[in-house]
Image (cartoon, grey):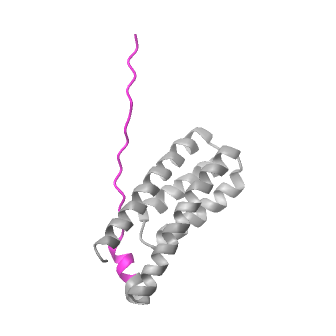
C-alpha cells in the first residue's frame, strides 16, 4: 500500500512597516486608517472574486482582478501578497492551469493571513 503525505503549507504574512509608516505620515492617522480599512475590504472582495473567476475559467477577468489586487497589496505594504499575485498573473499568461491552481491557493492562503496580520497590527495601534 502506498503512503500518502498530506502537506500543510505554512507561510507567514509579512507586512512592510516602512510602507505603513509612510502611509500614516502622508495621510495622518485617521485618513490612513480609513485607506487601510477600505483596502483590506477590497482585498477580501477581490480574493473571493478571483477564486470565482478561476472556477468559471474567465482568465482575462481573473488576470485583471489579480493585477488590481497586487496593486492594492503593494500600496499597503503586503509585499508577499503582491509577489504571489504577480505569480498568479504569470501562470495565467503562461496558460499553465495546474500551476495556476496551486498558486491561486497560495494567494488565497496568504491573503487571508495578510488580512489577519493587518487587523492584529491595527489592534496594537500602528
- Magenta highlight: main SS: loop
Q: Position of residue 4 (x, y in %)?
A: 40, 22
Look at 36% across and 70% down and name the residue there: 16
- In the current view of this chain or complex, which residue is farthest to the left? 124
Residue 45 part of the magenta segment = no
Q: Is residue 81 left or right of residue 89?
A: left
For the point 38% across and 84% down, which residue is it? 24
Where is residue 84 shown, x and y percent of the image?
A: 48, 55
Is residue 124 rendered to the left or right of residue 56?
left
Q: Residue furthest front?
A: 123
Mark count? 0
Residue 126 image point, x, y percent = 31, 77
Q: Which residues are magenta?
A: 1-22
Question: Does the segment drawn in magenta span residue 5?
Answer: yes
- Residue in the foreground of this view, choosing between 66 and 51: 51
Depth check, front residue: 72 or 126: 126
Amino acid at each position: 500500500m502506498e503512503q500518502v503525505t498530506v502537506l500543510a503549507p505554512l507561510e507567514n504574512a509579512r507586512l512592510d512597516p516602512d510602507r505603513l509608516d509612510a502611509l500614516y505620515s502622508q495621510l495622518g492617522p485617521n485618513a490612513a486608517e480609513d485607506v487601510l480599512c477600505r483596502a483590506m475590504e477590497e482585498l477580501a472582495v477581490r480574493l473571493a472574486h478571483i477564486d470565482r473567476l478561476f472556477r468559471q475559467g474567465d482568465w482575462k477577468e481573473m488576470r485583471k482582478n489579480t493585477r488590481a489586487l497586487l496593486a492594492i497589496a503593494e500600496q499597503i505594504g503586503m509585499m508577499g501578497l503582491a509577489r504571489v499575485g504577480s505569480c498568479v498573473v504569470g501562470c495565467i499568461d503562461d496558460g499553465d492551469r495546474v500551476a495556476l491552481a496551486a498558486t491561486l491557493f497560495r494567494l488565497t492562503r496568504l491573503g487571508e493571513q495578510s488580512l489577519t496580520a493587518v487587523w492584529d497590527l491595527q489592534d496594537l495601534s500602528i
